[in-house]
Image (tube, rainbow, N blue to C red):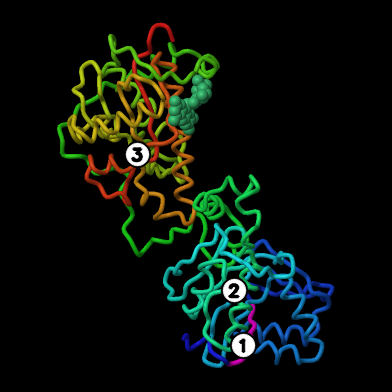
Amino acid sequence: MIESLTDTPLTERLSLVAGVYSAVSEDDRLRLVAGSRGETFGVAEAWKRELLHQLAAGPCPAAELAAQEHAARFLAALTSGGWLVTEVGREQGLLYALQPTRRPVPAPSPTPDQLILSRFAIVHRERDGRDLVIESPLAWARVHIHDPALLGLITGERPGSVGPGAAAQAVADRFRHDLYQCGLAVPVDGVEDEVFHLRQWSTHELWFHQRSRIGQRDRLGSGYGRTRWADGMFEPLPARHEPYPGPAVPLPAPDLGKLRRVDPPLAAVMEDRRSIRVHDDDAPISLSQLGEFLYRCARMRIDSGPDGERQLGRPYPSGGSVYELELYPVVRLAAGLPAGVYHYDDHEHALRLVRGPGPGMSRLIAAARRGTFEQSAPQVLIVVAARFGRLAWTYEQMPYSLVLKHVGVLYQTMYLAATAMGLAACGLGGGDSETLNEVTGVDYTHESAVGEFLLGSRPAAR
Ligand SMILES: Cc1cc2nc3c(=O)[nH]c(=O)nc-3n(C[C@H](O)[C@H](O)[C@H](O)COP(=O)(O)O)c2cc1C
């Protein structure tokens, strides 16, 4: 039997959600603001301001607040606006707290008998906290679980066992009702897996979409964007990837002045660009072509800024000028370059051998070939990896979405350079991210593959 869920009456305490400011306008209206969200609550009478002070100071028993003169309607308005955290407990202590993150959109009444946890809801422990939290991108509130016994109530469609007694059942009913109201629990025969606009989302993708964008949630306290949260806690990663110890192959650099004169015009390059998935193995890509290609797309340019400071940047744009992407040319066939997995040293414009041909390299090439449904293997597969910490040191919540944007920017840069050079190019949408780590020996959470790009000589017929 679960002690905390045994027979004692439920208690309810209210407090203001975090990050709320109140203001009184020139015409004496009371306004609450939290980030981009704001609501006006009529004349700023003294009793309203006093009530807000009480709610801001900490959780207050709901019954005592409601008993104050005029208070019930004001409290109801604050509740409908999503300005109040509701703590539900027993004499023995707190059970859970319902914390609105935006204006509530209550679910249709009555609460169905058969409920199940939403497919989009996730239970996790907060960073720096002990409580578990249930939240979902589709819910208007998150629920802090103080008593882990409650978790037994959310695992299936049937009400969980809460021990004997009417009051224990009241806890279960109230908890399930609250989860349903805020969108964390859904009817068993609901639409979550039936309508296309919900069915199309996997849990992680909907979370990623919501969490990497600004929302009202983000403004209610949690950091978002370029916060430099790690400053003073962790050393930033250097701009240059640690050079691999393998032999270096210096790459020829093109004459950019000449390229400015002889390259096809941008309009022609953009219009002629096509994805070409087969290569001419009788006349493979050469070392000098690979060198020119990498130089045009991804070398590190070191310039002086307006105040003489050193400015690092590659030919493609990158959020925060951080340049977290690393290029690993996996060379199957190239004139003048032995096969192997190389790392492109963007500072020295050189290739460094990471690993010669072997099972890891074969798996990378085979996965790329399967990705194009072609029988032939690419001459060069450029695996694009991200050093996540470069971005994650500075940005919160959005660094991975920035990585993927950068992969897109780099793909187009590579497509255009390859087209201008008469090479065959094709970006890939998915790939194996673990094999590269086996080959490089670098930890997956530090750096792993986020993109794949095929490059080779262009067959005459294409
Ligand atoms: C991000 C991205 C992912 C892609 N993924 C693949 C892929 O996995 N396999 C493939 O054969 N082509 C892939 N392509 C190439 C597209 O199929 C191609 O761009 C599209 O069919 C339009 O043809 P075009 O590039 O010749 O204009 C990808 C292109 C991009 C930009």
Kind of residue at disc 1: Ala
Q: Position of residue 315 (x, y in %)?
A: 42, 31
Residue in front for this viewpoint, 271 or 257? 271
Which sits earlier in the primary sequence, circle 3 or circle 1? 1
Q: Which residue is the site of mark 1?
A: 166
Q: Is residue 341 left or right of residue 421?
A: left
The magenta segment: 8-16
Kindly check if marks 3 and 2 are in contact, taking CB atoms under 8 A apart as contact: no
Q: Is 178 drawn above or below residue 95 in the view shown? A: above
Kind of residue at disc 3: Asp
Which sits earlier in the primary sequence, circle 1 or circle 2? 2
Q: Position of residue 408 (x, y in %)?
A: 47, 35
Q: Which residue is the site of mark 3?
A: 432
Query: From the viewer's perspective, is the residue at label 1 or at label 2 nearer?
Result: 1
Query: From the viewer's perspective, is the residue at label 3 or at label 2 nearer?
Result: 3
- The answer to whether the residue bearing label 1 lies less than 8 angstroms from the nearest atom of ligand 1 is no
Judge the density around disc 1: few (<14), some (14-19), many (≥20) Cα neighbours within 10 Å. some
Residue sitting at 43 percent across and 54 percent down? 394
Judge the density around disc 3: few (<14), some (14-19), many (≥20) Cα neighbours within 10 Å. some
Residue in front for this viewpoint, 15 or 204? 204
